[in-house]
Image (tube, rainbow, N blue to C red):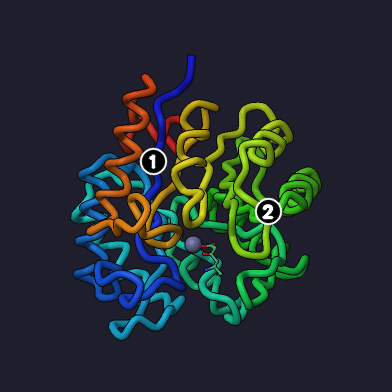
Amino acid sequence: MMEKLIITAAICGAEVTKENSPAVPYTVEEMVREAKSAYDAGAAVIHVHVRWDDGTPTQDRERFRVVLDAIKAACPGVILIPSTGGATGMTPEERLQPTELFPEMATLDCGTCNFGDDIFVNDMPTMRAFGQRMIENHIKPEYECFEIGHLDTILNMAKKGLVPGAPMQFNFVLGVSGCTPATVGNLNYLVKQIPSGSTWTVTGIGRSAWDMAAAGIVMGGNVRVGFEDNIYLGKGHKAASNGELVAKVVRLSKELGREIANPGEARRILSLA
Ligand code: KMH
Ligand code: ZN
């Protein structure tokens, strides 16, 4: 029998702006509003990037501290996954700052790739440093794979003890411009490679968000949605909040007969409890 579905909300990311959608959060208050809308709609996990009030992406440790504490207070029990990816062009040291706060989870990006017109650099020394930090600080990584080869890379690193090992949690982020396309075939290939006992989430970028959500639901994985990845509920129809995106996943999942995990259930499924 399938476990309940864990929904992650990626509420702001580093790239999307208020010009794209006025509901994209920058300030602490806006971050809390968007996190709570997602949590109230059924998200058990919030993936957190932070911005300065003018929208500039930052990995500043104290900004993370304030935002994470404020979301925790508004969303009791929620699982927070701060980003160590930040924005393209940031240094590894900058990006590692949220790990100094000892979050229970954080993202660990599994290789270099094109990212639209930019390059998202995750070379081997960077990944070894991030793996070592997460081992030392007892942080469970969410392994972000944007490319099929990223999975092979991180599985080899785990075998060598360079990053935290089983049970591993993967997020297959498909459809980034320049990376592996969001198809059910590609997702199925990735899912078949992961060690038994692992958990996985799928994220579809842009218009692929809903195909990938449906695939994640029926294939027994978990689903991420949110303004970081997609701002549309349907063609030409922008979501007014992250909560609306989460609510659509809840509807799809219930229609397909899969219940939604609350944060406590998600913590058990992810072996955090
Ligand atoms: N903003 C992207 C360049 C992560 O959060 O770990 C990287 C990203 C991945 O969003
Ligand atoms: Zn992210």
Asked if 202 appears above or below 51 in the picture, the reply is: above
Residue pointed to by mark 1? 7
Asked if 30 appears above or below 44 in the picture, the reply is: below
**Residues tagged 1 and 2 counted as in contact (Cβ below 8 A):** no
Residue 104, image x, y percentages: 45, 51
Give the Cα separation between the discs numbered 1 and 2: 22 Å
* Quadrant of residue 40 within the rendered picture: top left
Residue 218, image x, y percentages: 49, 26
Tell which of 145 and 78 is nearer to you: 145
In the displayed structure, does residue 195 sit left or right of residue 97? right
Amino acid at dot 1: Ile
Q: In the image, which is nearer the foreground, mark 1 or mark 2? A: 2
Amino acid at dot 2: Thr
Q: Is mark 1 on a helix, strand or loop?
A: strand
In the displayed structure, does residue 171 sit left or right of residue 60? right
Asked if 100 appears above or below 194 in the picture, the reply is: below
Residue 145, image x, y percentages: 64, 52
In the displayed structure, does residue 89 sit left or right of residue 2? right
